[in-house]
Amino acid sequence: MKGGDDVARIKDVDVLNGKLFPSIIRFGVPLLLVSLIQNLFNAVDIMVLGQMADNNAVAAVGATSTIVGLVVNISLGISMGAKIVIARLIGEGVREKTQQTVFTTIVTAVILGVLTMFAGIILAPLFLSFTNCPMEIYDDAALYLRLYFAAAPAIMLYNFGANLVRVAGDSQRPLYYMIASGLLNVVLNYVLCLIMPQKVAAVAIATAASQILGAVLVVCRILVMDNDCRLRVRGSKWNWRSFYKIMANGLPIGLSSSLYSIANLQIQTSLNSFGADAIAGNAAAVNIEGITGSIANVPWSSTASVFVGQNVGANNKKRVKHSILLCGAIASVLSLIISAVAIFFSPTLLSLFVDSDAAVRYGQIRMLYIVIPYVVAAINGLIGNTIQAFGYSIFTTVNSIFTVFVFRMIWMNYVYPLCPTFHVLMQCFLVSWILTAVINYIFFFYLYYGKFKKNKIKKMG
């Protein structure tokens, strides 16, 4: 390979050929480590605040989680659209269109990042007012949000660029970049919290700096890759057709993901009414759930999207089927194991983030309804990504509109008021997951047997 790989040569995974199971493991394990490390490093923010500040500081960061999730989910969704399009173009063997789409992808990332940065900094107080953020943590929460949004261009560049590297078959380098940026985050967390009186600002600055480092490393890589996913600045032009295809596939995914965060704004509002202990305990449980998802959900859903996307483009039906089955089996087994471990050690794990018994109890209630049945979310993520890889992202959006956005609104307005307890609040997530999964399954079987098996799946090229 070219591009400065003199010392360590990393061989890209051949998605279209060779033994499937070893290829899925070689591709998926680095994604697992990337996702796990990212969630562990994100958890460091809460852990450092829990050790060096108080529950109000933890609650301030926790109160922003739904808003931050909204930005991240939209970014990841649109970048997934680029990954789907490029994976299919690689499978179809249309090199010029692939390179054209790569350039358009990066320009799109920059534009979206800058727009998000300005909108987030200006509208941060408005976002917090929507969730009735408690006044005792309001100023810290607004500060954290503004500093986080300042790094939005870097977040967009990293997400889009890392997907370009992965879709080319290299899932290892994004792991190295995540380790480097994560280590910077940890070091800066402790150093800045020691020297700065404002602890929330310290962890926000550390997070922003780590995002910037990750973006720089990814951009440096895509400029020197020796495959069709390389970013060629000279002679490249923005292409409206490529942009349309990216957005046609990515916007539905981004909207679908953002619907979770939008629907959760009302849940966050009710959660805030339980006080700082509930917010802190919920934030701690969310971090544990993130680690669970990083092992059992995210890597195998992402792996399936690349393997299915390229092999659909190459019309390799057998390889598509086996990719789905293998990724599904791995996700199911890992979700059952990690959920059992997380629940068994829940008091100890939650105590790493919060220092009050009340906060731990709130965290355990959330884990009861979300971590124990996590296999539902893992398989749902896999099926949703497969539907998107087939080129029908719009369906997952329509499904989410009804089973997430509308359903959670109905639950919060008609079911929760009948019994306004923390248990009923958390049950909303589980019931919504089950509904989404059932409908995704139905449409997946329709697509697989009604279109893919009959060669009716639309092409990208």
Image: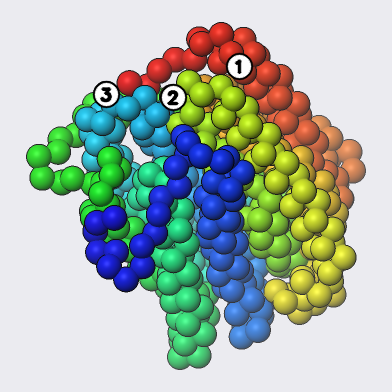
Tell me which numbered mark, 3 or 1, is placed earlier along the sequence. Answer: 3
- Residue placed under numbered mark 2 in the picture: 314
- Residue placed under numbered mark 1 in the picture: 447
Q: Secondary structure at mark 2?
A: loop
Q: Answer whether labels 3 and 2 touch (C-beta < 8 Å).
A: no
**Rendered-image quadrant of the N terminus:** bottom left
User: Is disc 3 surrounded by few (<14), some (14 to 19) or many (20+) residues within 10 Å?
Assistant: few
| 3 or 2: mark nearer the eye | 2
Q: Which amino acid is tagged 1?
A: Leu
Instruction: From the viewer's perspective, tell me whether residue 135 is left or right of residue 102.
Output: right
* Residue 91 visible to the viewer: yes
Q: Answer whether labels 1 and 2 touch (C-beta < 8 Å).
A: no
User: Is disc 2 surrounded by few (<14), some (14 to 19) or many (20+) residues within 10 Å?
Assistant: some
Residue 50 locus on image (x, y percent)? 66, 79
For the residues labelled 3 and 1, the Cα–Cα distance comes to 25 Å
- Residue placed under numbered mark 3 in the picture: 241
Residue found at x 40% / y 18%: 459
Q: Which amino acid is tagged 2?
A: Ala
Instruction: From the viewer's perspective, tell me whether residue 142 is left or right of residue 55.
Output: left
